[in-house]
Image (cartoon, helix red, strand yellow):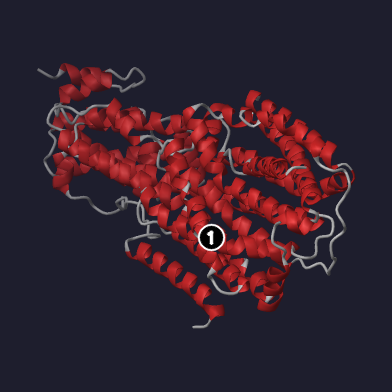
């Protein structure tokens, strides 16, 4: 190595060495935490561990997200407020009603699955079907998810009653059937 | 003039050059505060830097004409405009007013810089002997600017950066003691823009160190301006320490090549940081500082040495360097903005997934989601304070372990996403610095070495 090449080669070696060490320790390889594929069936035990109603809400989100070709997380964030729902719908080239329809369909399928697996009784199934058909989907999903601490249909109806904008025909009559 | 008077006058002139050129980078660490105070965007606030460098680059060459005919009054008028504009910047109530103040500051600063080399030439006898003092003052100013600005922002407030420049006006009387006669014209030679092109590309790359790094440290990782200022001091310290290496680095042309490689390598290393840690930025910064010490003197001397009869070519190096900084900011600001948007969405999705799947009661999850949502909104495009969001939504009894695990998981995701958003912008600046190798290589060994040899030593 002569005088003219020594300094450039030393600088090159130092640069490559530093970059190589950083890359070896994971530099430049950021991958965001994976979000689960909503079209894949989730572990039933995992859903049950969250409580019946939260499990149904998560399952409904999965089904709707699969139909809409978005992640469950994107859909959950979009249901947080009407503007976010509109933004998601616009990004998918559909309207907000389509998003709502997908969530209702997802909720009904989740209720079907839970009933078929014997995880909910007839009364719970009836309440949930009424909710799936008539309740505004954002508050309904939030209400269901808020019930993991109280897995009773009475708790569900009380929770739903707390949402002033819920208009579910027959909910009052169903409530009267409770002891 | 007596020798002591000569020394004092030279130091005073050099000080004004250093302060003016420090302004090209001194507000970098104050930008997050400016961003928060005026509620603008990252791209919008980048114009606080861009406007100054752009106007300085555009006006410094025309200012040379004034410097030739009226250097003393031009220097005093430039200082007056610079000081008045500094007061306007400190008193600004909107980002538009701040940018307008920066434009006026740059116009005054260009006059100061152009007239300062003329006055130094009248003291030293020629522009060639004035150039090393003038060039070193500018380089020191740019290098220490971010650290000083960060310290002032933390210890006082960002407005103090501008107010503390006003006392420069006290130096105005020294112009009267400088002889009015211009120096003998120096030798002329054919114009060669290759060193200027190399300086411009290297300066464009340096925006990675001057702009990106401080934004990453403060807005990305949440360091205080003072801590960030201490961290970015590594570059000027390394440059200072590397002066001995520069002397032993072989022929000047080789030193310039080595410098460009080191700056590009250091910037590329900042683009592949393995973790969100200030300590990991020190090694790349050291490489950048050493690279600057090797490349800048050789390229500057190659640009002006022996062929600057009236100071115009020295001013051209300033124009080239600041035009390079402008190009760098204009390229990387939108790139950074776009990367931040993408990574923010990914981090939000990851945090949502983590919260949805966490083994916590829904009451806790809802409180946490609301607190994090508020945190993201309050951050207004910057990285949210995850710790504060978790602190404001305490867990239910028995959930502390899962809660702590969730916080660590989300915190790591957010920090890594923020760090990753800076990767491509850093790599882009590394590419710009690497492109400086082309004109530096084409400069050839003989030309640069010859110019290095003939550049006269300061008296």
**Which residue is found at the position 37% from the left and 45% from the top?**
B415
Determine whether B65 is above or below B75 in the image: below
Quadrant in which the C terminus of chain B appears:
bottom right
Q: Pinpoint residue B396: horizontal percent, then vertical percent.
A: 17, 27
Q: Tell which of A100 and B383 is nearer to you.
A: B383
The image quadrant of residue B48 is: top right
Asked whether residue A92 appears in the rendered view, the answer is: no
Q: Tell which of B191 and B76 is nearer to you.
A: B76
**In the figure, is residue B301 to the left or right of B359?**
right
Q: Residues within 10 Å of mark 1 (few under 14, many from 20)?
A: some
Asked whether residue B292 appears in the rendered view, the answer is: yes
**Count of labels shown?**
1
Q: Work out which residue is located at the far bottom of the displayed protein and give it.
A: A1
**Which residue is found at the position 18% from the left and 50% from the top?**
A43
**Which residue is found at the position 42% from the left and 34% from the top?**
B376
**Which residue is found at the position 90% from the left and 45% from the top?**
B69
Callout 1: chain: B
Q: Tell which of A52 and B322 is nearer to you.
A: B322
Q: Work out which residue is located at the far left of the displayed protein and give it.
A: A179
The residue that label 1 is drawn on is B243
**In the figure, is residue B369 to the left or right of B222?**
left
Q: Pinpoint residue B221: horizontal percent, then vertical percent.
A: 40, 42
Q: Secondary structure at mark 1?
A: helix
Determine whether B80 is above or below B245 in the image: above
Q: Pinpoint residue B425: horizontal percent, then vertical percent.
A: 52, 54
Quadrant in which the N terminus of chain B appears:
top right
Q: Pinpoint residue B58: horizontal percent, then vertical percent.
A: 78, 48
């Amino acid at each position: 190595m002569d005088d003219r090449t020594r300094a450039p080669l030393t600088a090159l070696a130092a640069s490559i060495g530093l970059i190589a060490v950083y890359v070896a320790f994971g530099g430049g390889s950021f991958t965001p935490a994976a979000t689960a594929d909503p079209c894949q069936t989730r572990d039933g035990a995992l859903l049950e561990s969250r409580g019946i109603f939260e499990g149904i809400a998560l399952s409904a989100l999965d089904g709707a997200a699969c139909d809409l070709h978005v992640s469950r997380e994107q859909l959950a964030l979009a249901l947080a407020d009407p503007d976010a729902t509109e933004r998601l719908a616009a990004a998918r080239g559909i309207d907000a009603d389509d998003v709502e329809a997908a969530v209702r369909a997802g909720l009904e399928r989740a209720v079907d699955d839970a009933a078929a697996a014997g995880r909910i009784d007839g009364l719970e199934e009836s309440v949930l079907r009424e909710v799936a058909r008539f309740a505004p989907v954002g508050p309904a999903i939030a209400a269901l998810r808020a019930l993991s601490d109280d897995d009773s249909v009475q708790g569900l109806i009380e929770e739903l009653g707390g949402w002033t904008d819920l208009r579910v025909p027959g909910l009052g009559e169903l409530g009267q059937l409770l002891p | 003039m007596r020798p002591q008077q000569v020394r004092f006058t030279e130091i005073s002139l050099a000080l004004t050059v250093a302060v003016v050129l420090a302004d090209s980078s001194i507000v970098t660490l104050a930008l997050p505060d400016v961003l928060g105070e005026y509620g603008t965007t990252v791209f919008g606030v980048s114009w606080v830097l861009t406007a100054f460098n752009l106007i300085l680059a555009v006006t410094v060459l025309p200012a040379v004409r004034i410097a030739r005919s009226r250097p003393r009054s031009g220097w005093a008028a430039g200082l007056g405009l610079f000081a008045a504009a500094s007061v306007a910047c400190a008193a600004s109530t909107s980002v538009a007013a701040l940018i307008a103040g920066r434009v006026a500051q740059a116009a005054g600063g260009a006059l100061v810089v152009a007239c300062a080399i003329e006055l130094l030439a009248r003291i030293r006898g020629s522009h060639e002997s004035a150039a090393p003092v003038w060039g070193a003052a500018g380089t020191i100013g740019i290098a220490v600017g971010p650290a000083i600005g960060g310290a002032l922002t933390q210890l006082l407030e960002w407005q103090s950066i501008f107010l503390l420049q006003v006392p420069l006006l006290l130096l105005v009387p020294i112009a009267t003691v400088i002889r009015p006669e211009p120096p003998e014209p120096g030798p002329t030679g054919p114009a060669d823009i290759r060193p200027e092109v190399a300086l411009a590309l290297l300066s464009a790359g340096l925006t990675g160190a001057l702009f990106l790094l401080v934004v990453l440290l403060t807005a990305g990782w949440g360091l205080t301006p003072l801590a960030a200022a201490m961290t970015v001091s590594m570059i000027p310290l390394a440059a200072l320490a590397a002066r001995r290496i520069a002397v032993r680095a072989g022929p000047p042309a080789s030193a310039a090549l080595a410098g460009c490689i080191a700056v590009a390598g250091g910037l590329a290393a900042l683009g592949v940081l393995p973790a969100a840690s200030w300590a990991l930025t020190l090694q790349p910064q050291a490489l950048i500082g050493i690279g600057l010490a090797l490349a800048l003197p050789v390229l500057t001397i190659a640009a002006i040495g022996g062929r600057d009869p009236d100071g115009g070519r020295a001013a051209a190096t300033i124009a080239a360097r600041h035009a390079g900084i402008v190009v760098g900011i204009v390229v990387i600001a939108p790139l950074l903005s776009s990367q931040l948007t993408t990574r923010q969405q990914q981090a939000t999705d990851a945090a949502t997934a983590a919260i949805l799947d966490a083994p916590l009661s829904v009451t806790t999850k809802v409180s946490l989601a609301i607190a994090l949502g508020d945190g993201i909104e309050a951050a207004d495009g910057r990285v949210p304070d995850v710790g504060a969001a978790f602190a404001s939504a305490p867990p239910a009894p028995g959930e502390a372990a899962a809660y702590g695990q969730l916080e660590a998981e989300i915190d790591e995701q957010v920090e890594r996403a923020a760090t990753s958003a800076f990767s491509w912008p850093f790599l882009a600046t590394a590419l710009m610095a690497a492109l400086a190798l082309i004109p530096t290589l084409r400069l050839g060994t003989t030309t640069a070495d010859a110019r290095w040899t003939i550049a006269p030593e300061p008296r």
